[in-house]
Amino acid sequence: MLKFITWPFGAICIMSLIAILFQKARWRKYLHPFSYVGRMAFTNYIMQTVLCTFIFYSYGLGMFGKVSDVAGLGITIVIFALQMLFSKLWLSRFKTGPLEWAWRKFTYWGR
């Protein structure tokens, strides 16, 4: 029961710390790569969903329940690092992510 109170509190503390550090000039250069992922949040969310369902569900590699916590953390870090790289490369060429672009086009279709 206690974890349901402490986990959200811990997440809020971590997000607050990152927000405070991002305001400091010397930390901004280290945290800036995260901004690319944030600018393509919808694309990265869908990409994570597709990759993880392929890795863990039976229609893909079927690794659910077979991966240790440490291996799961490693998979998470690798996927996120690849998303950071993909986001930076994509945004160096285009203004928005592909799904963000499509969402905007469908939203303002008739205008």
Image: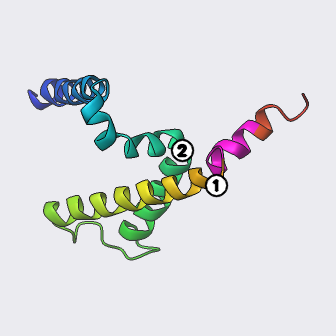
- Residue 39's label in the rendered image is none
- Residue 40's label in the rendered image is 2
User: Is 69 positioned to the left or the right of 29 in the image?
Assistant: left
Highlighted magenta segment, given as a residue range: 95-104
Asked whether the beta carbons under mark 1 and mark 2 sit within 8 Å of each other, the answer is no
| Few, some or many residues within 10 Å of mark 2 (<14, 14–19, 20+) | many
The percent position of residue 93, horizontal first and vertical second, equals 64, 55
- 81 vs 107, nearest the viewer: 81
Question: Which mark is first along the chain, 2 or 1?
Answer: 2
Position above or below: 10 against 84: above
Position above or below: 66 against 111: below
Q: What secondary structure characterizes most of the magenta part?
A: helix
SS assignment at label 2: loop
Q: Residue furthest right?
A: 110
Quarter occupied by the C terminus: top right
Q: Residue furthest front?
A: 26
Quarter occupied by the N terminus: top left
- Residue 93's label in the rendered image is 1
Task: Say which of marks 1 and 2 sits in front.
Answer: 1
User: Is 111 positioned to the left or the right of 108 in the image?
Assistant: right
Scheme by which the image is coloured: rainbow
Position above or below: 82 against 59: above
The percent position of residue 33, horizontal first and vertical second, equals 39, 46
Question: Going 53% across and 58% down the picture, which residue do you hit?
Answer: 89
Residue 98 drawn in magenta: yes
Q: Quadrant of residue 108?
A: top right
- 2 vs 16, nearest the viewer: 16
